[in-house]
Image: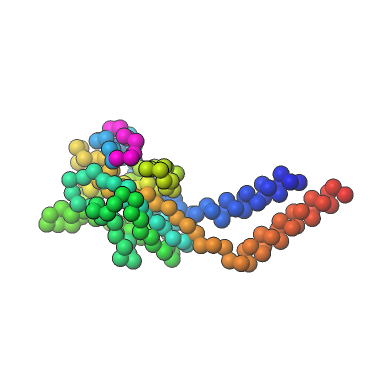
Amino acid sequence: MNRTLIASILMVASGFANAGLSFVPSATENRTEVFDVAGFPAFAVGSAVPVGQLVTSELGTATFTYLGQESGYINSLHLPNGSNLFESNAIGTSISLLVTALGVVPFSFREIVSPALASAANGGPWSPNTSIGLIGQNMNVLGNNYSFVLGYNDSAGLANLGDWDDFAVGVNFASPAPEPGTYGMLVAGLGLLGWVGRRRKQ
């Protein structure tokens, strides 16, 4: 009975902690340059990169952390609440967004190509030769863990610049704490398991 009870508690706890964030690929590309941002593995030329969008099946808070860049252009990340990450920020700088709708997590990468501006919106339009790629999942970078690490490619499709290291961010997601009623149901369920276990012993 003790094992069953412990397993049930762990299952419920993992359900609360498991945010519904996922990356939905629209295509798979190959790097034509080494991914060489400091603190990352050196992903080799020819390695695959899923490109697509980040979506959520839960409401909560998405946190974006700047992890570095390797680009000749000026790139940045923008949230609809007005928060931004720039190349001038210190590595490890974070901004957050309260996600109030299921589906695509709203953010965009932008690139200044003087005098024009290019961008890739998550789940929205991408300027020609730009894309959002999945660098890693459940990844440790510079001593911190990220559910997803995304890279912006400010010139995807150009044979000498396909590396997705032009602006890298780590993304974590936290669901809101369960309502008090949820805890009540959890306690009632655990009590029922305990009662069933005692009856079986008798």
* Residues shaded magenta: 38-46
Classify residue 85 by image quadrant: bottom left
Colour scheme shown: rainbow
Q: Residue at x 60, y 53 (%)?
A: 13
Residue 52 visible to an observer of this rendering: no
Would residue 41 be counted in the magenta stretch?
yes
Q: Residue at x 50, y 54 (%)?
A: 19
Q: Residue 122's x, y, as percent?
A: 33, 55
Q: Residue at x 42, y 63 (%)?
A: 99
Q: Residue 201's x, y, as percent?
A: 85, 47
Q: Residue 187's x, y, as percent?
A: 69, 60
Q: Residue 127's x, y, as percent?
A: 23, 53
Q: Is residue 62 left or right of residue 180?
A: left
Would residue 24 be counted in the magenta stretch?
no
Q: Is residue 117 above or below residue 38?
A: below
Q: Is residue 140 above or below residue 110?
A: above
Q: Residue at x 67, y 50 (%)?
A: 8
Which residue occupies the foreground of this view, 24 or 165?
165
Helix, strand or loop: magenta stretch: loop
**Residue farthest along the right direction in this orientation:** 202
Residue 149 visible to an observer of this rendering: yes
Classify residue 46 by image quadrant: top left
Total numbered labels placed on residues in the image: 0
